[in-house]
Image: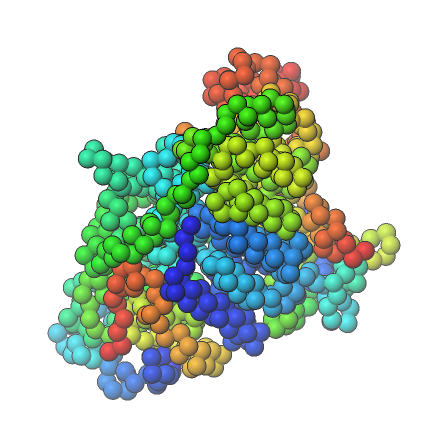
Amino acid sequence: MYNYNQFDHDFVRNRVDQFRGQVGRRLDGSLTEDEFKPLRLMNGLYLQLHAYMLRVAIPYGTLNSRQMNQLAMIAEKWDKGYGHFTTRQNIQYNWPKLKDTPDILDALADVEMHAIQTSGNCVRNVTADHFAGAAADEIEDPRPTAELLRQWSMDHPEFQFLPRKFKIAMTGSPNDRAVTKAHDIGIRMVRNENNEPGYEILIGGGLGRTPMIGKVVREFLPKADLLPYIEAILQVYNLHGRRDNKYKARIKILVHETGIDTLREWIEEAFETQKAYHQAPPQEMIDAIEAQFQPPEFDTAEVDEEKLADALSSDPLLRSFVETNVSQHFDHNHAIITISLKPIGGTPGDATADQMRVMANLAQAYGYDELRISHEQNVILPHVRRDDLPEIHRILKEAGLATANVGLLSDMIACPGMDYCALATARSIPVAQELSNAFEDLKHQQDIGPLKIKISGCINACGHHHVGHIGILGLDKAGVESYQITLGGDGTETASIGERAGPGFSYEEIVPAVSRLLDLYMEIREGKDDTFLDVYRRVGAEPFKQALYPEEAESV
Amino acid sequence: MSVIVRDNGFEKDTWELEGGIFIDLEKYGQDVMERDPSKTAIDIPNDVTIESLKGLFGSASMIRIPFPSFADGRGFSLAKQLRQHGYDGRLRAKGHIIADQYGFARVCGFDEVEIDFEMAGRQPEEQWMARIPDQELSYQKRLMGQRPLRNV
Amino acid sequence: MARIQYPKVVTANHLLEGDVIYMTASGKWSRKHEEAKLFEDPQEAELALKMAQGQAHMLAGAYLADAQLGSNGKPEPVHFREAFRTRGPSNYPNHGKQAEG
């Protein structure tokens, strides 16, 4: 866990004071609404459909119990008793008042948190693998680098008014749980032939109106060169990114229109200048950051395997929870728990203040005081002893947090959609709720197996529909909600963009349409290990299109 | 007339009163020999490459970069590039810049900001002075020893 | 096919609270769509919008939204987005205007 030093504290407090001043200057007319808007956005404050919305950063998804308890306090004191965890490791409050926002930011600063650059055309919250520092398959913990980038990006004088928003994601594992290929910059921790640690850098990934998979711009970047190289990418983007059309302003369009090879030359040239001009970060600062991400001192007592096996065999609910929600930790006595925020029929990603406190207490009592937020809108206990699993499961069950559906159909991503978002063209949450209810039998979901359904309420694709095995995009078609299906998307290391299946479905038709897809899948799969994505990649779109549009299929 | 914002407050723009001229980059090539570099300021657009500017450094004592909108941040990168490539004359930002950006402009290498009277009235001097960059609170300075900050 | 020209209401969000508000016949603001003034004349509507935009000290994001006279003789929204704005989020029936009854 990164703990603020005096500098961090001073910086964040100063920023809160600045924002308090900006709110005052908006009210006294010094700032027009047009001028105030980007400033409030850079402090996480949106004006949405029904109210303001405050987006708070949870850098690289890591937080402790004190911070989680404070998020609960804020939810109760200034909001309606809940928060919404997002696909970019943020938490959103849907009902704050403008005049309360500086106080909320102060309360965040009390626990070493902030909302800086969670919106605006600047470098956003740097995200990372939610299993970082715990996963069995990890090469290196990406979070010290993510923290370095967080610091570097904070109030960067040159890059606060970019052509468009800029998102960076990192992974330290070959299995990409951070969707790095769909970010403006994706960073993968790698080793070169001499086994020296460094980074592979991708640019130009993104979803939205024009989805693109990121391209490798540098195969191996030595660790010490990170900041000047990232600075070079941002400078080239700031100067050359399009500003004539909001929908063509992301770096992915620059990559697409200029070509990765030309862009690489520009970046390398700018990199040489940056490197000669700036000093490398002082080693003691790097060391101080890295020291704070050392794994906790694990309890080394051996797990009583027999006792655990007994508990599992006598409690089918626990067994199924462990099968779906528990992942392998690098320490054999420990495990990683994913707490699903996707109860059947619930709003994906929402947690009440009470639930936040339960999770905070669990982290404190059983989890070395660590929590994570995943881009799939769930909460992670990254380090728990395996013999504590029965007790943790019992407590989660009491709090309505033990849904054993991680990675299954009802573990959907859904953006807030038109229930909250001013940009949305259709609702997404109720679609997620109805799908979840239609497949409420978890046994049936387990039988269907790994499935990623992702729902966005507009073309901006905050719900990642392009990388859902089944993606659903809600649009406004002549004043009526219409839902388009994409198939075969994948957000992992084998990333691909889903293909549009055909005309959209009405709100009433969308759940039956998804059911038909799954009926077909169950019929033609070659056993339980043959996942939906495997089958789609093998047989192609055609059979699924026929299942979606049976009448057209008959008339042909 | 415009108002010039510098770290010591609002000032009148005396450049032309003292015999200085502004000349567009595209007209720069004409009559170069007749101009006194110490009285010459070049207006450059914010989409030029640094390569096309390198030859000008010695023949002008001011470069002025436009901000058509405060949301267009190209001027910040261009100023930084000029400093990185050795331009050490006066550097001015002109146009729609807000007080909240004054520190960014300064740290990127601008010496001063030129605003109109409407802006100077709406965002008075103290709002700009409140944003004189506090280098003690800069992550970039801590991490990279950020340099361009001057006020000739 | 010509688009139907609906009457308009002037709507915005309250600057401090963030709530959805509507301009009434007296030029004041109400949180209730049914109290909004319905502008049949496009020019009059544009003029009212300009007035609203001049009140930047108390509201943000003013625009004209389609509306029509409902069966109860009061204005009602035409588009589903505007209908949601009169109610609140569908996943929490106890949040937003719909909770106030």
Where residue A263 appears, as percent x and y from the top left, is 28, 45
Rendered position, A399 above or below A77: above
Q: Nearer the viewer, residue A436 or A212?
A: A436
Where residue B65 appears, as percent x and y from the top left, is 31, 68
Residue appearing at x 23%, y 85% in the figure: B19
Rendered position, A356 above or below B55: above
* Quadrant including the C terminus of chain A: top right
Residue A471 visible, this orientation: no
Q: Residue furthest left?
A: B33
Q: Nearer the viewer, residue A470 or C83?
A: A470
Q: Tell me which corner region of the image, top left, top right, bottom left or bottom right, holds residue A256.
A: top left
Relative horizontal placement of residue A21, taking residue A99 as reference (left or right): left
Rendered position, A81 above or below A297: below
Relative horizontal placement of residue A513, taking residue A173 as reference (left or right): right
Residue appearing at x 55%, y 40% in the figure: A378
Q: Nearer the viewer, residue B62 or A449?
A: A449
Residue appearing at x 74%, y 63% in the figure: C31
Rendered position, A455 above or below C68: above
Residue A156 visible, this orientation: yes
Query: How many numbered marks are there?
Result: 0
Where residue A84 appears, as percent x and y from the top left, is 59, 48
Where residue A59 appears, as percent x and y from the top left, is 45, 51
Residue appearing at x 35%, y 48% in the figure: A144
Question: Please, which colouring scheme is shown?
Answer: rainbow
